[in-house]
Image: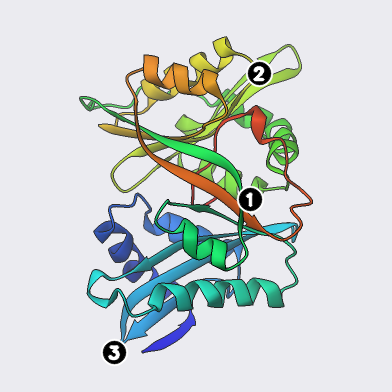
Amino acid sequence: MQLRAMTQKDIPGGVRLNTVAGWNQTEVDWKRFLDGSDQGSFVMEDDGRVVGTAATLRYQDRFAWISMVLVDPGYRNRGIGTQLLERAVQYLDQCGIPTLKLDATPLGKPLYEKMGFVSEYEIERWILRRTPRQELATPDTNPAAEQLPEIFALDCDVFGADRSRLLGSLDERAPHLTMAVASGTQLEGYAFGRCGLFADHLGPWLAGDRRTARGLLAEFLRRSSRETVLVDAMKSNRVAGEILEESGFSMARSLTRMYRGPNAFPGKPHRLGAIAGPEFG
């Protein structure tokens, strides 16, 4: 077997692995990893077949994300996932990235702790299953597009680094799921979404008050046509959890945001209702 940098030709192999695992990523998402961190994603290859992956995303050289650590079920318990994770960490260390972050499942958390990662806060995945609609309830125009510069600036403050490239990609691929609420010239909230393999995913989702948060979620659900909708909400944001539960969502699993390094740019996560997703931060 060979551990090497991931290329565009490996994307179908990555999609195969996340499909087997029941994860929601598409070819577009894998391309985002490759575009966002040149040579920073890796595969384990066996006889020309991708049997393991790990991806990274760098944000302004302030911190980087590690995600998509996947191993083919037939190749598990051979240390492949650990090798891929260690290679991703090594790459980011060589690039001089001071802080590494990831969202850990309860199963993966002990491994990350052994590698020096510590807990920052908790995230809860909420899921809604409903009868799908045949047609999207999309607006004729996307007024949020005019507010993208303001959204990017606010998101940078909240997230801790500029990720306008990622948010711009989300808007480009699913403009009907980009929303903003403003009072005069003051931005009160925003939300993005993406169309995943089996579900539409809401995030990031930010609102200054309950009414704005509820309105953004309701509008997202109106515009989305999928049977399944996912939201990775901040556990500390009780308002977000209450609104999701009132809207028919149920809590599916918990995640722990972890970091290694100084965490000099933590952002203002308490302002978020939901993150962009475990793969993006």
Q: Are marks 3 and 1 in contact (CB under 8 Å)?
A: no
Q: Is residue 258 above or below residue 48?
A: above
Tag 3: amino acid: Asp
Mark 1 nearby-residue class (10 Å; few <14, some 14–19, many ≥20): some
Residue at position x 25%, y 31% from top? Answer: 227
Q: In whole angstroms, how far apart are the C-alphas of marks 3 and 1?
A: 35 Å
Residue bearing mark 3: 47
Q: Which mark is residue 208?
A: 2
Q: Is residue 39 left or right of residue 198?
A: right
Q: Quadrant of residue 186?
A: top right
Q: Regarding mark 3 in the picture, which secondary structure is present there?
A: loop
Which residue occupies 56% across, 61% down?
A: 113
Earlier residue among tags 3 and 1: 3
Q: Is residue 121 visible?
A: yes
| Quarter occupied by the N terminus | bottom left
Residue 107 position by quadrant: bottom left
